[in-house]
Structures are given as structure tokens and as C-alpha cells.
Image: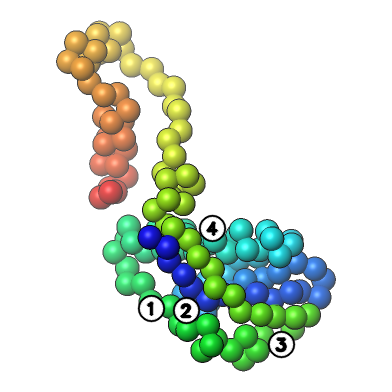
């Protein structure tokens, strides 16, 4: 499902862009080019929404584009505009936040033999143990 929020894009005098999401406590990011700033805005929005969902935080309703005043708060910029930033948080998370990483570990041979005999999924056991150790409820 696509989630869309308005963002203010500010072109800096010294180059680059700052991006601010007024609805999300002025969450911000930046980029050296407009293209990079847009990519970073998508990443920033996805990360915020993903984290808020997993921490069961309330997520503000997005403002209408017409209700955002790009000039109201910041005056030290070369130019500014408001644009909607869209992201499918679930799809983005699968590619960027939830992808698996390979780990190498060592266990005693006898323990490995018993686990293999019992069809133990080593990856799942390690994930569960890490979540328990770190007190994560995911």
C-alpha cells in the first residue's frame, strides 16, 4: 500500500537540498542533488513509518499539499517547493530493512549432530535467541 506525505524541498545556497516532513515532527534528510534528495526522502519516510509501526506509535495523518507553507519557517535557502513523497513501506522494508545477512558461527560438533537429527532450522533458532536476548518483541 502506498503511503504519501508532503515534504518541503529546500535548495541550499552552497549546494544540495534539505528535505523536511512537516507532519512528522519536522523529520529531515538531505541530498547533494535533487535526485538524491528525493531518494533520501523516500528512505527517510519509509524508515520513520516502518519504525513507528513496529514500536506501535501513532502516525499523523498527512496534510494536504495545499496546506503546507514552504516559506513559513525557513528563509535561508536559494529556492523551495513542496512535493508529495510516496513509498510502499512493506515493499521498501523487504528490500532495505528486512533483507537477511549471512553469519558464520561455530558450535560443538555433538550439538550440531543432534540439531541436524531433529531438523532444527539454525537461522530461526539464532533469530529467536537474538530477539530474546535483546528483548525485542517482533
Secondary structure of the residue carrying numbered label 1: loop
* Proximity of marks 1 and 2: CB atoms separated by less than 8 Å: yes
Residue 5 is at least partly visible in this image: yes
Q: Position of residue 53 (x, y in %)?
A: 33, 61
How many labels were placed on the picture?
A: 4
Which residue is label 2 attached to?
Answer: 23
Which residue is label 3 attached to?
Answer: 75
* Proximity of marks 2 and 3: CB atoms separated by less than 8 Å: no
Which residue is label 1 attached to?
Answer: 61
**Residue at x-position 32% and y-position 68%:** 57
Q: Earlier in the sequence, mark 3 or mark 4?
A: 4
Q: Position of residue 63 (x, y in %)?
A: 45, 82
- Front-most of 74 and 33? 33
Q: Is residue 115 above or below residue 47?
A: above
Q: Earlier in the sequence, mark 4 or mark 1?
A: 4
Query: Farthest residue in the left direction?
Result: 118
- Classed neighbour count for the residue bearing mark 1: other residues with Cα under 10 Å, few (<14), some (14–19), many (≥20): few
Query: In the image, which is nearer the foreground, mark 3 or mark 1?
Result: 1
Give the alpha-carbon distance from disc 3 to disc 4, as whole Å: 26 Å
Residue 126, located in which quarter of the rendered image? top left
Residue 114 is at least partly visible in this image: no
Which residue is label 4 attached to?
Answer: 43
Amino acid at each position: 500500500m502506498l503511503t504519501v506525505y508532503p515534504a518541503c524541498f529546500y535548495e541550499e545556497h552552497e549546494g544540495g537540498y534539505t528535505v523536511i516532513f512537516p507532519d512528522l515532527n519536522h523529520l529531515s534528510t538531505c541530498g547533494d542533488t535533487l535526485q538524491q534528495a528525493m531518494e533520501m526522502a523516500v528512505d527517510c519516510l519509509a524508515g520513520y513509518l516502518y519504525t513507528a509501526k513496529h514500536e506501535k506509535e501513532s502516525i499523523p495523518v498527512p496534510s494536504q499539499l495545499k496546506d503546507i507553507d514552504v516559506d513559513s519557517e525557513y528563509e535561508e535557502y536559494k529556492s523551495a517547493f513542496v512535493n508529495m513523497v510516496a513509498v510502499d513501506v512493506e515493499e521498501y522494508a523487504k528490500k532495505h530493512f528486512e533483507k537477511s545477512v549471512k553469519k558464520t558461527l561455530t558450535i560443538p560438533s555433538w550439538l550440531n549432530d543432534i540439531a541436524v537429527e531433529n531438523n532444527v532450522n539454525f537461522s530461526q533458532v539464532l533469530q529467536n535467541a537474538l530477539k530474546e536476548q535483546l528483548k525485542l518483541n517482533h
